[in-house]
Image (cartoon, rainbow, N blue to C red):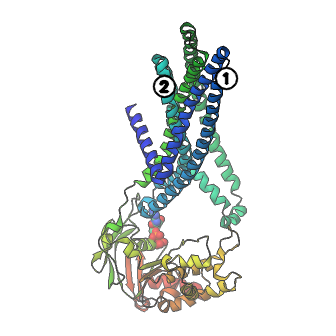
Amino acid sequence: MIKNIKNMVDVFINVFKLLWKSSRFYFIGMLIVNIFSGLTLSLNMIIWKNIINTIQKAFETGSTKLALYWLIGFMFLEFFQNIMDEANQYFKNILASCTNKYITKAILEKTKEISMTHYAEASMHDKIKKASEESVGRTMNLLYSTGLLIKGISVFISTAIILVRFNPPTMIICLVTSIPMLLISMKIAIKQFAIYNERFENIRFIEYIKALLTKHENVKEIKIYGVTDFFIEYIDKLYKRYIHEDKKIRKKFSFNSMGAKFAENIVVYIIKAMVCIKVIILKISIGDLTLYISAIDNFKSAIANILSVITTIYEDGLYVNNFFELISLEEEKSSKRELFFNGKFERIIFSNVWFKYPGASDYILKGVNLEIESGNTYAIVGLNGSGKTTILKLLLRLYLPNKGHIYIDNKDIADMNIESYYKYIAAVFQDFIKYPLSFKQNIGLGDVERMDIEEEIIDAAEKSGIYDYINSLPAGIDTKLQMEWTNATELSLGQWQKLAISRAFFKKAQILILDEPTASLDPVAESDISSKIRELIGGKTCILIAHRFSTVKLVNRIYVLKAGAIEESGSHSELMLKGGEYSKLYSMQAQGYID
Ligand code: ADP
């Protein structure tokens, strides 16, 4: 119980912090407006009492003047209430947008910090998805509920003052009878949150499948294999199970809350009966009778509102806590590292590097030693799964070695300030990003700071050989890509690859990393890029993975990787002379062509 209360307090503090950080001005504005809104309700009751009493007096005096003044006062109060309602809507809407902005920005900022190791965990994907999907919607609810809470408290206090003057125990009984309902509602909220967490990965999976089935580039394969029904059946089964569970839980809670409400109502009516008796005995005016009866009603509904709002805030707050959990994840801040890279170096050395992926039991790299000299071109060759891409990932410091070190001129890259390191590196991955933007922006994103320099974007596009095609399109380099968007065009995989290569060229980095950059290119484009690779990268260091030996043979030095270790290395001619693994692989490929 104490833990629950502490959790609840934490959730509340977090929610208020979130709203405060999103916009102080609108948050305070919303608070003030709701306090006034609540107070007007009690004033409303008092004025109404006076209207009735003055009318009653008018029977004796014959003067309706006073009643008229109170009625005019009542009209102004309603007018004031309308202004407060409108102001509340205004503050709430703007605060909602500010909070949305704050949450979205904070989540995206955080994703910059999350390491690849964390990204490999399913729980991290759950966290990001929960935070980004639920937080925004739930914060809207929270805003609404916070407004109601403030108003509820304000009504509670003002009606409590009226009731205390009348009879203090009445107020305490009303308060106590509301507790069972609070406990039931909190239990529902906690149960629902547990269910949500339990189901989250499955729901995320369904969302993923939905997106997969409707993605433009997947439609053709889905139609040919007719897989949609398989997934529909899977999703249907899962939802049926959830609906069955939900029905059971809901039934139980509905019975409980019906019982609690029934008991509560009986108590309230007993109190009201007592008020009536007291009015008769003490000969209190009719105006006072209406004031006290409506004070009891409003006091009760203020408590009910406060309690139900507390449970909704608590429930929504539990979901928004995902956001706080994500934001407070302690990721290692590379910018705190002192070692800065300025792009100049003599050699990069892998010294006895061992590596296994997080959670995996087997080592993928088993004592890799290799050397990369500045200004030279290198290729890593080997069979699928031998660890070539893994070497590049370590070189890019997406992961750190489990054993051994990677040095740049005797400095361990583990100690390097990562932003300064990435500034001088460009990479083309096998699964490069296809941004739903224009050609120009797709290439320009290689270097955001220079993305408006059109001549250099064109130059990079020319180098990869895609420019002539871009230029032939009506909108030229401003043509949007990906058919899912309005006025866009689609590229072939080879054309996308050329675009990704252009993006890397545009960055003007010192180190260029290419993971099978020509795999989808036609023979003409491949030979064109391969033969010019040294000229294209212009004296920079290049490390590439390639399966086509026509590209590989042109580099300065080749590393042959076998089962996670370097088997041999040298230039194409040296390795051919040696007659080892490389010459075997080369001959196999060459044989395939000759046949
Ligand atoms: P290559 O590039 O030589 O084809 P990779 O370096 O991509 O090989 O992969 C080497 C091995 O590491 C493969 O067996 C692959 O299954 C495994 N692997 C790759 N990425 C991950 C990952 N993120 N988590 C776990 N294992 C991985």
Residue drawn at x 46%, y 45% is 15
Picture layout, residue 176 above or below residue 510: above
Q: Of all residues shown, which one is farthest toward the top?
A: 281
Q: Secondary structure at mark 1?
A: loop
Circle 2 residue: 160
Q: Give the quadrant of residue 278.
A: top right
Q: How many other residues sit within 10 Å of disc 2, few (<14), some (14-19) or many (≥20)? A: many
Q: Amino acid at mark 2?
A: Ala
Q: Secondary structure at mark 2?
A: helix
Circle 1 residue: 64
Instruction: Identify the disc placed on residue 422.
Output: none
Looking at the image, tell me whether mark 1 or mark 2 is earlier in sequence order: 1
Q: Nearer the viewer, residue 54 or 338?
A: 54
Q: In x, y percent, where is residue 358?
A: 40, 60
In this orientation, does residue 252 appear?
no
Q: Nearer the viewer, residue 261 or 396?
A: 261
**Marker count (numbered):** 2
Q: Give the quadrant of residue 259.
A: top right
Picture layout, residue 412 above or below residue 379: above
In the picture, the quarter occupied by the N terminus is: top left
Q: In x, y percent, where is residue 36?
A: 53, 38
Q: In x, y percent, where is residue 585?
A: 48, 82
Alpha-carbon distance for marks 1 and 2? Answer: 31 Å
Q: Amino acid at mark 1?
A: Thr
Q: Nearer the viewer, residue 77 or 407?
A: 77
In the picture, the quarter occupied by the C terminus is: bottom right
Q: Is mark 2 within 8 Å of ligand 1?
A: no
Q: Is residue 373 left or right of residue 590?
A: left
